[in-house]
Amino acid sequence: MPTSNPLLLSPAPSQCSLEMMTHHYGDVYEHSPWVAESAWQQGLTEVHDTPDALAELMGLMLQQASSEQQIKVIQAHPDLAGKAALAGELTQDSTSEQAGAGLDQCSPEEFSRFEALNAAYKKKFGFPFVIAVKGLDRHAILAAFEERLNNDAVTERQTAIQQIIRIARFRLRARAEQ
């Protein structure tokens, strides 16, 4: 019976210099290469050459960061179906993820709804709404948006961080599958 090999990242994080780690994995967290740098500084072993193990370590780095650092990471994320998406100014990962959820196919009414929710959310929390859109459609995203607007600031920061960690895991898995 053949055994299945786990997905491995290339280049192997355990074999990366700090410069290589930042070059290859620094963009996993939107405009926040310090997360990859922090993971490298913790010491990477062959265990971290899988997407899930590297995602765990990088997620831990973000969870252990100050609330100010966490908020900066959240603020680095674009609005969903926002002006940057319409203008084609998103990172390649964000463009692909939003398109995968059908956000590039919103009706004018849905775009208006996203715009209103983005504004209300930013006004309340001071950062953009972040959700791992993989496996969701725009209707589920809008429902989550409305539900999470009821959270308090601490709960929502923690929820956004968990969603960002999920996004990073999806991105690392996608890279290992290439």
Image: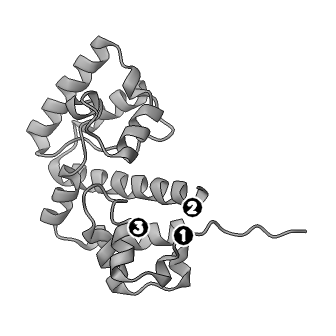
* Mark number displayed over residue 79: none
Check whether the beta carbons of the residues at disc 1 and disc 3 lie within 8 A of each other: no
Up the image or down, 13 lies above or below 174; here it is below
The answer, for residue 144, to whether it is visible in the render is yes
Q: Secondary structure at mark 2?
A: helix
Q: In front here: 151 or 10?
A: 10
Up the image or down, 72 lies above or below 136; here it is below
User: Callout 2: few (<14), some (14-19), or many (20+) C-alpha neighbours within 10 Å?
Assistant: some
Q: Residue 40: give x, y in percent of width and height.
A: 36, 81
Residue at image x 55%, y 83%? 46
Give the mark nearest the N terminus, 2 or 3.
3
* Quarter placement of the C terminus: bottom right
Check whether the beta carbons of the residues at disc 1 and disc 2 lie within 8 A of each other: yes
Up the image or down, 33 lies above or below 158; here it is below
* Mark number displayed over residue 176: 2
Give the mark nearest the N terminus, 1 or 3.
1
For disc 3, the marked residue is 24
Question: Horizontal placement of 46 versus 42: left or right?
Answer: right
Mark 1 is on which residue type? Answer: Ser
Mark 3 is on which residue type? Answer: His
User: Callout 1: few (<14), some (14-19), or many (20+) C-alpha neighbours within 10 Å?
Assistant: some
Q: Residue 14: give x, y in percent of width and height.
A: 49, 82
Number of marks in the image? 3
Give the mark nearest the N terminus, 1 or 2.
1
For disc 1, the marked residue is 10
Q: In front here: 141 or 27?
A: 27
Q: Residue furthest right?
A: 1
Label 2 and label 3: CA atoms lie apart by: 12 Å
Q: In front here: 44 or 87?
A: 87
Closer to the eye: label 2 or 3? 3
Label 1 and label 3: CA atoms lie apart by: 9 Å
Query: To which quarter of the image does residue 106 belong?
Result: top left
